[in-house]
Amino acid sequence: MRGPGPRRAWADVVRDGLLVALVLGLAASITLSETTLVVLALWLLFGRRPARAAPGPGWPLRAPMAAFAAWTPSSVAERSFNEPP
């Protein structure tokens, strides 16, 4: 008879809980979902990774994110200057 399976690391349990909070926040409270999203992003950026983990793919969406970041202020500026008096 086998014993219980491998125990999950506490980090996996916390991450799964944060993902559930994000989904519930999207359904119920934008503040909860925003807070959870910030915590998950910080976890992703500064969290510990196993030593054998391969490096990530980098920033595959760098170009679209840069285009969005550049376009948004120009769109806002254009709209604010073209509003009727």
Image (tube, helix red, strand yellow):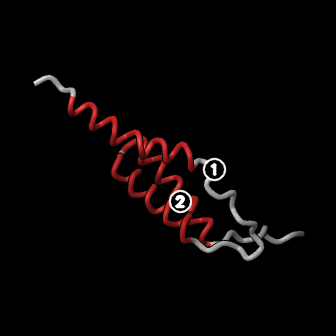
How many callouts does the rendering have?
2
Residue 82 located left or right of residue 73: left
**In this view of the protein, which residue sits in the foreground, 58 or 84?**
84
Question: With respect to residue 78, does 15 lie above or below?
Answer: below
Q: Amino acid at mark 2?
A: Gly
- Point out the residue furthest to the right here: 1
The residue lying at 62 percent from left, 65 percent from top is 12
Residue hosting label 1: 60
- N-terminal label among 1 and 2: 2
Q: Residues within 10 Å of mark 1 (few under 14, many from 20)?
A: few
The residue lying at 56 percent from left, 50 percent from top is 62
Residue 48 in percent (x, y) is at 61, 74
Q: Residues within 10 Å of mark 2 (few under 14, many from 20)?
A: few
- Point out the residue furthest to the left here: 85
Residue 75 in percent (x, y) is at 33, 35
The residue lying at 61 percent from left, 55 percent from top is 59
Residue hosting label 2: 17
Residue 26 located left or right of residue 47: left
Tag in front: 1 or 2: 1
**In this view of the protein, which residue sits in the foreground, 67 or 26?**
67
- Point out the residue furthest to the bottom here: 51
Cα separation, mark 1 vs mark 2, equals 27 Å
Residue 84 located left or right of residue 71: left
Question: With respect to residue 12, does 27 lie above or below?
Answer: above
Which quadrant does the C terminus fall into?
Answer: top left
Place residue 16 in its image quadrant.
bottom right
**In this view of the protein, which residue sits in the foreground, 78 or 40?**
78
- Point out the residue furthest to the top here: 84
Q: SS at mark 1? A: loop
